[in-house]
């Protein structure tokens, strides 16, 4: 089977540092072109990364007939418009998270959904530690899963960074809170009914710098999480059942090419002393994500997540933002 030929939309940091090198290691993915608003910038990155073609505009990349799939890591406010443009040009699109600014905007992609593959790039869902965690939940090892609890933070007050610019979709919920939402949906394998959130905004940037939320999945099941762009870096996911507690040590930024650990604790000893560690072998979740998408492009597997999934996620973010304004529970 021939590798899928990918084009990269922009010289975004996440592409340069993580996604492109990972895809270049893929069994089914080849990175054939990169575009930037500046040809010099595109050329420089192409030369440094061994990418054959460089374009000085995004439109030129979309017009390249050799490119089959696009990776879209543009600022959040451009995700839908450029994913739509790429899809209309007949390209399959792996689009970075958050998929859109809101669910309504994402609905515009229904026009092209049946024609090409479109997936939101939540690479964590391809990591064996997430798959193993879900397997443990499914097996009943935790008893009944009652609570998924997530924390995700870093400290970034750089004024030019897209995370601190509200006009391009900055803020903690869009940038990292969305991962916690995915963790809840992934482990409960359900969609929530309602959500509530408390936001703290940066006085200068006006972005949400800390968000704390409760997401109600019904029947006593809830996700609660805090995400912050201005706290000491930390991340954890716990799945708490009626009999055991499961913990993912590095749930979101698992070391690329490194091993990971999860813990299962029956609480027979206090303070987590009875937790049993399970080590997952080294992998690169961006490689796994790229190859899964490429296999779907070739028709070898069904696309694991599509437009409906991305819209479901956006509906939850919408409800959380609305709750921040109303101070009430909001239906999803
Ligand atoms: N999945 C993950 O692990 C992960 C991690 C980090 C970020 N992300 C997502 O990836 C996306 C990019 O994040 P990043 O941190 O890599 O951002 P970044 O380095 O700022 O890259 C964004 C790129 O978009 C292009 N661009 C076009 N219009 C722009 C504008 N008005 N302002 C700034 N840049 C503009 C620029 O490329 P050119 O100059 O080449 O045109 C820029 O390099 C975001 O959606 C983010 O949520 C995902």
Image (cartoon, helix red, strand yellow):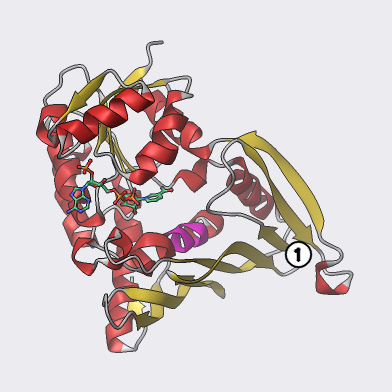
- Rendering quarter of residue 266: bottom right
State left or right for residue 211 relative to residue 129.
left
The secondary element bearing badge 1 is classed as loop
Residue 121 visible (yes or no): yes
Which quadrant, please, contains the C terminus? bottom left
Q: Residue 57 in the image: state x and y as whole percent.
A: 12, 34
x 89%, y 70%: residue: 269
> Foreground: 145 or 207?
207
- Image: magenta residue range: 179-184
Residue at the farthest top position:
1
Q: Is residue 130 magenta?
A: no
Residue 143 quadrant? bottom right
Residue under the image location 28 percent in, 59 percent down: 162
The reply, left or right, for residue 166 in relation to residue 144 is left
Q: Is residue 316 visible?
A: no
Q: Is residue 182 magenta?
A: yes
To which residue does mark 1 refer? 244
Q: Residue at x 37, y 68 (%)?
A: 173
Q: Main secondary structure of the magenta part?
A: helix
Q: Quadrant of residue 178 in the image?
A: bottom left
- Image quadrant in which the N terminus is located: top left
User: Counting other residues with Cα less than 10 Å from the Cα at mark 1, is it few (<14), some (14-19), or many (20 or more)?
Assistant: many
Where does residue 138 sit, x and y in percent of width and height?
A: 64, 51
Establish if 238 lies above or below 224: above
Q: Is residue 279 above or below residue 141?
A: above
Depth check: give the residue in front, 319 or 232.
Answer: 232
Q: Position of residue 314 (x, y in %)?
A: 31, 60
At 37% from the left edge and 26% from the top edge, which residue is drawn?
49
Q: Residue furthest right?
A: 269
Q: Position of residue 98 (x, y in %)?
A: 32, 55
* In the displayed structure image, the side of residue 291 where residue 146 appears, left or right: right
Queried on whether the Cβ of the residue with tag 1 lies below 8 angstroms from ligand 1, the answer reads no
């Amino acid at each position: 089977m021939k590798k899928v030929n990918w084009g990269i939309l922009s010289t975004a940091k996440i592409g340069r540092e993580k996604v492109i090198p990972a895809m270049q290691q893929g069994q089914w993915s080849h990175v054939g072109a990169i575009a930037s608003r500046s040809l010099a910038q595109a050329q420089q990155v192409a030369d440094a990364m061994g990418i054959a073609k460089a374009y000085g505009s995004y439109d030129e990349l979309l017009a390249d007939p050799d490119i089959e799939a696009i990776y879209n890591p543009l600022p959040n406010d451009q995700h839908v418009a450029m994913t739509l443009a790429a899809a209309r040009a007949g390209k399959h699109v792996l689009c970075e998270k958050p998929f859109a600014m809101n669910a309504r905007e994402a609905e515009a992609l229904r026009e092209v959904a049946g024609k090409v593959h479109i997936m939101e790039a939540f690479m964590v869902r391809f990591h064996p530690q997430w798959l193993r965690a879900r397997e443990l939940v499914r097996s009943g090892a935790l008893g009944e899963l009652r609570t998924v609890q997530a924390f995700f933070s870093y400290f970034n007050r750089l004024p030019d960074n897209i995370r601190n610019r509200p006009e391009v979709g900055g803020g903690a919920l869009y940038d990292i809170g969305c991962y916690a939402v995915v963790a809840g949906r992934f482990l409960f394998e359900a969609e929530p009914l309602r959500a509530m959130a408390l936001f703290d905004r940066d006085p200068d940037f006006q972005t949400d710098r800390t968000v704390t939320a409760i997401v109600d999945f019904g029947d006593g099941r809830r996700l609660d999480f805090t995400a912050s762009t201005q706290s000491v870096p930390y991340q954890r996911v716990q799945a708490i059942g009626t009999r055991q507690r499961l913990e993912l040590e590095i749930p979101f930024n698992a070391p690329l090419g490194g091993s990971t650990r999860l813990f299962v604790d029956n609480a027979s000893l206090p303070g987590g002393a009875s937790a049993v560690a399970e080590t997952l072998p080294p992998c690169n979740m961006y490689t796994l994500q790229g190859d899964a998408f490429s296999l779907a492009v070739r028709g070898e597997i069904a696309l694991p997540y599509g437009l409906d999934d991305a819209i479901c996620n956006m509906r939850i973010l919408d409800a959380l933002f609305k709750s921040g304004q109303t101070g009430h529970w909001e239906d999803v």
